[in-house]
Amino acid sequence: MQEAFVKELIGKGVLYSENIIKAFQKVRRIDFVHEDFHTQAYEDAPLPIGKGQSISQPSTVAQMLELLQVEPGNRVLDVGCGSGWLTGLLAEIVGPSGFVYAVDIIPELTELTKHHLYSYHFTNIETRIGNGWLGLPEHAPYDRIVVSAAASEVPKPLIDQLAHGGRLIMPVGEDIQDLVLLSKDLQGKLEKQVQPGFQFVPLVGQPKK
């Protein structure tokens, strides 16, 4: 099932980089969904994980990772870690010389992330309860930032915490969102790329306007 699942994503053209393919092969989505949904773990669809949150559609996760261009040794901030699948994929890609800081505002989900990742024995992950809108300034700057929940705009604290030469990806918008990729060059100038037509849960903790 795992091999067919990965081949399907490759066939859709959303998964193509060798390091990301290897991560998908090793960090199995079925380990990060409730046993009630094990029969659906390899479907290309989001699944509920509790507390009104979901584990993202695999093809969307693949697209985000490909656009983010995560590299070995990167320091990554994972906002809205949920059940921990993306956290595990990131940890596998950055390797022992990199590090992943995983943040979720819902305490039960940070515990769920820890529980799901326990059997993988990663030593390059730290999970935190916190407001993802504010990021994690004490460990900034980050080479890569990924946000798995939608907001009306890219939070300025996250842009500030992005390293020069870094990349940030997140969904922006209301009901149907754009997947926004921000690249910060070595002088600190931002370049924006947009892919429309995505749907994520809203980012909890964004300030009211």
Image (cartoon, rainbow, N blue to C red):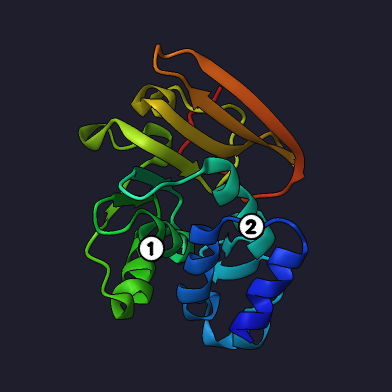
75 is higher (above) or lower (below) than 11:
above
**148 to the left or right of 129:** right
x 64%, y 87%: residue:
1
Is the residue 170 above or below the residue 153 in the image? below
Instruction: Tell me what residue is drawn at x 62 percent, y 79 percent.
Output: 41
Pointers 2 and 1 in contact (CB under 8 A)? no
* Element at label 2: loop
Which residue lies at the image location 46% right of the left edge and 60% below the top edge? 82
Alpha carbon of mark 2 to alpha carbon of mark 1: how far? 16 Å
Q: Indicate whether 16 appears above or below 68.
A: below
Front residue of 172 and 70: 70
Image position, residue 25 (x, y; %): 52, 74
Q: Position of residue 87 (x, y in %)?
A: 41, 59
Residue 13, which numbered label?
none
The answer to whether any part of residue 44 appears in the image is no
Quadrant of image for the C terminus: top right
Whichever of callouts 2 and 1 sits on the residue coming sooner in the sequence is 2
Label 2 Cα crowd, 10 Å radius (few <14 / some 14-19 / many 20+): some
> Crowding at label 1, few (<14), some or many (≥20) Cα neighbours within 10 Å?
many
Percent of width and height locating residue 99: 28, 51
The secondary element bearing badge 1 is classed as helix
Q: Is 137 displayed left or right of 44 in the figure?
A: left
Left or right of 200 in this view: 73: left
Q: Is residue 135 above or below residue 58?
A: above
Q: Position of residue 143 (x, y in %)?
A: 37, 36
Q: Amino acid at mark 1?
A: Glu
Residue at image mark 2: 16
Q: Which residue corresponds to mark 1?
A: 92
Q: Nearer the viewer, residue 206 or 5?
A: 5
Amino acid residing under circle 2: Tyr
